[in-house]
Image (cartoon, rainbow, N blue to C red):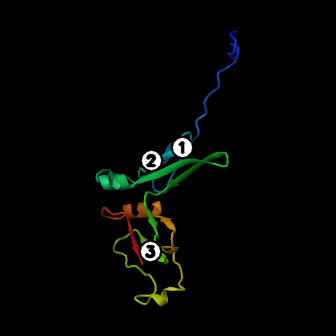
Amino acid sequence: PFPGLPRVDRDEKPRATVDHAIGVQVPGFKWIQGMTADTSGRKFYSLVPRSADVLHKVNNDWRLANATKILTEVGLENGGRLITARSLFEIRNNTSHHLLLELHPNPRHAPSMPGGDNLDNMVPWRLTPSVGELEPRASFQVPLLLLESALQLQGSHLGCVWIR
């Protein structure tokens, strides 16, 4: 052998590379195969509806096609890899007071936020599955299930968010 170069045995088998990938399924959409965790960064994956009617609607409207994606981010944490998958839509409260949110897939839905015009009646109040409170400086990911439910309805909308 040459000086300074490592000795290589011919009988040594080459190492196989390992791909770190997962599959994810969001309810109402087909499986997303091969979400890779080998490289850090962000990547968008398209959500393909399982329903033929919804698939036709999404394929015929580029806005719906662009909105039905999932954002993944791969990072390192505690010596391992961390994959985060989230909705494209986020609500951030950059104010110094609490915000009330109500989400519904149907734009004809009348919001049922408590208190009316009197802000004093807003606290305390009972949370329903579609209503929530957003703390100051906090953020909220709009659920993909809201988008999926809205796509099942007629029209080219992705649901509604009321903020108070």
Sooner in the amino-acid sequence: mark 1 or mark 3: 1
Q: Nearer the viewer, residue 63 or 33?
A: 63
Q: Name the spot of residue 5 as percent of width and height, x first.
A: 67, 15
Q: Is residue 38 left or right of residue 109?
A: right
Q: Measure the C-alpha gap from mark 1 to mark 3.
A: 34 Å
Sooner in the amino-acid sequence: mark 2 or mark 1: 1
**Numbered circle sitting on residue 40:** 1
Q: Nearer the viewer, mark 1 or mark 3?
A: 1
Counting every numbered tag in the picture gives 3
Q: Measure the C-alpha gap from mark 2 to mark 1.
A: 15 Å
- Give the amino acid at mark 1: Ser
- Give the amino acid at mark 3: Glu
Q: Nearer the viewer, residue 133 or 104?
A: 133
Name the image quarter holding the C terminus.
bottom left
Task: Report the residue marked by disc 2.
Answer: 45
Label 3 packing within 10 angstroms: few (<14), some (14-19), many (20+) = many
Q: Nearer the viewer, mark 2 or mark 1?
A: 1
Name the image quarter holding the N terminus.
top right
Q: Name the spot of residue 87 as percent of width and height, x first.
A: 46, 58
Secondary structure at numbered mark 3: strand
Q: Residue furthest top?
A: 1
Sooner in the amino-acid sequence: mark 3 or mark 2: 2
**Numbered circle sitting on residue 102:** 3
Label 1 packing within 10 angstroms: few (<14), some (14-19), many (20+) = some
Q: Is residue 105 left or right of residue 140?
A: left
Q: Nearer the viewer, residue 163 or 26?
A: 163
Q: Name the spot of residue 41 as percent of width and height, x first.
A: 51, 45
- Give the amino acid at mark 2: Tyr
Residue at the image position 33 percent from the left and 63 percent from the top: 157
